[in-house]
Image: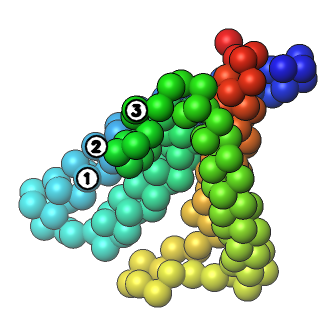
Amino acid sequence: MPRIVQAYVRGVDAVNRTLGRVVMYAVFFFMLGLLLYASISRTLLGAPINWAVEMAQFSLAAYYLLGGGYSLQQDAHVRMDLIYARWRPRKQAFVDSLTAFFIVFYLGVLLLGGLSSTQYALEFGQKNYSSWGPPLAPIKIIMCIGVLLMLLQAIAIFFRDLGKAIGRPIA
C-alpha cells in the first residue's frame, strides 16, 4: 500500500484510539459525579435537580457517538458469523472491503443530515422540550464529530482490509 494510505490509517487509528479511551474514562467519572450529586441533592438536601437525568442522557450520547470510531477500530461491533468465521482471513478481508462501501455511504448520509440538523440548531437556537430546556447545538456538534470519526475509521478499515486482501497488509 502507498505510504500516504499507511500514514492515513495509522493517523486515524491513533486519533480514535486516544479519543476513545479518554472519552471512556472521562464519561465514567463525569457520570459518577453527576449522578452522585443528583442523588445527594435529592435525598440529603431535599432539593431534586431537574437537569441531572437529561445531562446524563447527553453524556451517554456523547460517549457512544465519540466512541464509535474506537469501537470500529477494535472490531467490537456485532457481526453474524455463521458463514464468515469459516472463511480464510484473506477472503474475510475481501468481503469486508466490499461491505465497507455500505458503511461509508451510510455514515456519509448520516453526516450530511447531522450537519444540516446542527446548522438548524445553531441558526434558530433550538432547545430541547423539557423543563430544563438545554440548547441542542452542543450535542449535535458532538454527534457530527463522532460520525466524522466513524467515517474516517471506516475508510481506514477499508484500506486495511484491501491491503490484507491483496497480500500487502498495513501493519
Q: Quadrant of the N terminus?
A: top right
Q: Which residue is found at the position 64% from the left and 55% from the top?
A: 103
Residue most extreme to the top = 171
| 161 horizontally vs 70: left or right | right
Is residue 62 in view? yes
| 127 horizontally vs 15: left or right | left
Residue type of the residue flagged with mark 1: Leu
Q: Are marks 2 and 1 in contact (CB under 8 Å)?
A: yes
Residue type of the residue flagged with mark 3: Arg
Mark pair 2, 1: CA separation: 6 Å
Q: Does residue 28 sit above or below 47 in this rendering?
A: above
**Could you tell which of marks 2 and 3 lies nearer the N-terminus?**
2
| 133 horizontally vs 105: left or right | left
Mark 1, residue position: 35
Q: By what rule are the colours in the image chosen?
A: rainbow
Mark 3, residue position: 86
| SS for callout 1 | helix
Q: Which mark is residue 32?
A: 2
Residue 26 is drawn in which quadrant?
top left
Place of residue 138 in the rendered image (x, y in percent of width and height, measured from the top left): 62, 63
Query: For mark 2, does the 10 Å Cα neighbourhood hold few (<14), some (14 to 19), or many (20 or more) residues?
Result: few
